[in-house]
């Protein structure tokens, strides 16, 4: 589809129908990025005042927190933020019904998130929140010469059930993108991906670091002229971007790689600018940094995020358990807070005996499909214990039955065409890594 047609006659009308003022907000964000840090901080305080007042009055969870902390919701202000305890992913999952506020039908959308821990959460977002997320992303993609409607090659997950696949196809059409499965791929699949890219000639590519790196390595090895397609930029996300991955992807695509960092709960958090700094989406989020040094990175800070716009599921002082390294103001001139790097999130890929590799998100989608069916599973981890055997470690919830585990094991065996066997092992808890995080997938 021609980018101008996609932008003005497909995507923009779709945002209007959903009640999401994306383009109006985008025009504003293109201006606010050049504000001084002090101006941006004042804007954050205005939004934060509103969020705290709303949450402590409309959310049972935050109303109780305010009362227990002696906070008067009628006089609450941005300065009271630090009086709230941090919110962990398990807190969010366990208290989601009490955290969410009442919103009229049709004014929210649902987002299922999982991340690298396997602790999936399904939360509501109001239309203004989703509009600001999209606007911040499009503003940042504009740094790379990308506009709404530009054709995208998306290396991403593919839903497992037909109904959800159909819905994702409609979203891909609206956003003018072609999707390549990052879940399982053979050399034949990668060859087909290249031919499709050569046919549609996308303006930019987007996806998981591991998948883009694998595809790049294949194109280099097979001497496929991917760099002649005309892709302007590659945006990597969801996993740690190493220097080696960046170099390999840039070599194959013949385009600059830019890093994106975010999570499903709050959307995009950091984007890399043309000068190499990672900038915060400060119009949407308040970021708190707690010193959390590692032997390799003494300047590391743990990242705590407050979403300023999601009134349907207020997330106040949400602890992502990821680390960032602050940077001085960037020479690009933007007033958005700058960072040198972000780390702490990565996925393993499990390789089956036939050579196919299954991304961590493949297993997460199976887990989410099970939860959509009502499986009583609190948390899960997928561990490759033999070349063809995956041990599914499950922390059960009340009501768990043998059929719940059978769904997971049968799904893995069916979706891998029998290349992987699966056995379910019940656990009281999932063992954490030395970093304190839980890995969703552990490969041999």
Image (spheres, helix red, strand yellow):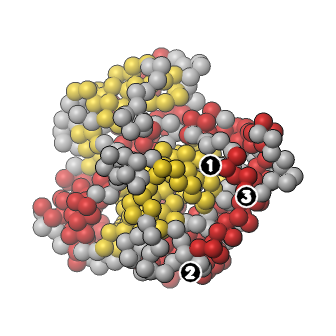
- Tell me what residue is drawn at x 55 percent, y 45 percent: 319
The answer to whether 249 appears left or right of 99 in the picture is left
Residue at image position (51%, 60%) is 269
Kindly report the distance in space between the C-alpha atoms of the residues bearing marks 2 and 3: 23 Å
Cα–Cα gap, marks 1 and 3: 12 Å
Determine whether the residue tagged by mark 2 lies in a helix, strand or loop: loop
**Residue named by callout 2:** 34
Location of residue 61 by image quarter: top right
Tell me if mark 3 has few (under 14), some (14-19) or many (20+) residues whose alpha carbon lies within 10 angstroms of its own. Answer: some
Label annotation for residue 142: none
Bin the neighbour count of mark 2 within 10 Å (Cα to Cα): few under 14, some 14-19, many 20 and up: some
Mark 1 or mark 2, earlier in chain: 2
Residue contact at pointers 2 and 3, CB within 8 angstroms: no
Residue at point 50%, 36% (across, down): 119
The reply, left or right, for residue 289 in relation to residue 340 is right
Q: Where is residue 188 in the image (x, y as percent from the top left)?
A: 20, 54
Which quarter of the image is occupied by the N terminus? bottom left
Query: Which residue is at a point 36% across and 35% down the rendered structure image?
Result: 434
Q: In this view, does 228 lie above or below 113?
A: below
């Amino acid at each position: 589809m021609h980018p101008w047609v996609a932008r003005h006659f497909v995507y923009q009308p779709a945002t209007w129908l959903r009640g999401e003022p994306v383009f109006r907000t985008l025009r504003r964000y293109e201006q606010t990025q050049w504000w001084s840090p002090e101006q941006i901080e004042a804007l954050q305080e205005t939004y934060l005042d509103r969020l705290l007042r709303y949450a402590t009055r409309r959310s049972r969870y935050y109303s109780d927190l305010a009362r227990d902390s002696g906070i008067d919701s009628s006089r609450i202000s941005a300065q009271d933020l630090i009086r709230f305890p941090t919110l962990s992913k398990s807190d969010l999952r366990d208290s989601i019904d009490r955290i969410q506020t009442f919103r009229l039908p049709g004014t929210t959308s649902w987002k299922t998130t999982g991340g690298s821990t396997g602790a999936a959460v399904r939360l509501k977002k109001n239309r203004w929140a989703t509009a600001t997320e999209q606007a911040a992303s499009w503003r940042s993609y504009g740094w790379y010469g990308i506009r709404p409607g530009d054709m995208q090659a998306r290396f991403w997950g593919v839903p497992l059930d037909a109904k959800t696949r159909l819905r994702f196809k409609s979203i891909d059409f609206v956003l003018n993108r072609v999707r390549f499965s990052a879940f399982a791929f053979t050399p034949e699949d990668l060859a087909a991906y290249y031919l499709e890219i050569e046919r549609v000639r996308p303006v930019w590519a987007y996806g998981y670091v591991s998948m883009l790196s694998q595809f790049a390595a294949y194109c280099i090895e097979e001497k496929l002229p991917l760099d002649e397609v005309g892709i302007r930029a590659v945006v990597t996300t969801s996993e740690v971007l190493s220097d080696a991955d960046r170099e390999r992807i840039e070599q194959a695509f013949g385009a600059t790689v830019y890093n994106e960092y975010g999570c499903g709960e709050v959307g995009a958090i950091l984007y890399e600018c043309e000068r190499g700094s990672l900038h915060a989406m400060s119009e949407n989020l308040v970021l708190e940094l707690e010193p959390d040094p590692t032997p390799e990175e003494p300047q590391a800070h743990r990242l705590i995020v407050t979403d300023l716009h999601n009134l349907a599921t207020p997330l106040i002082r949400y602890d992502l358990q990821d680390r960032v390294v602050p940077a001085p103001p960037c020479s690009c001139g933007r007033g958005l807070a700058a960072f040198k790097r972000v780390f702490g999130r990565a996925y393993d890929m499990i390789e089956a005996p036939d050579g196919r590799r299954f991304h961590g998100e493949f297993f997460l989608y199976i887990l989410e499909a099970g939860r959509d069916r009502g499986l009583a599973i609190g948390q899960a981890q997928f561990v490759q214990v033999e070349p063809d055997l995956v041990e599914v470690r499950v922390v059960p919830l009340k009501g768990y039955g043998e059929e719940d585990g059978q769904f997971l094991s049968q799904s893995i065996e069916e979706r891998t065409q029998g290349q992987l066997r699966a056995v379910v092992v019940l656990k009281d808890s999932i063992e954490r890594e030395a970093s304190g995080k839980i890995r969703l997938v552990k490969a041999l």
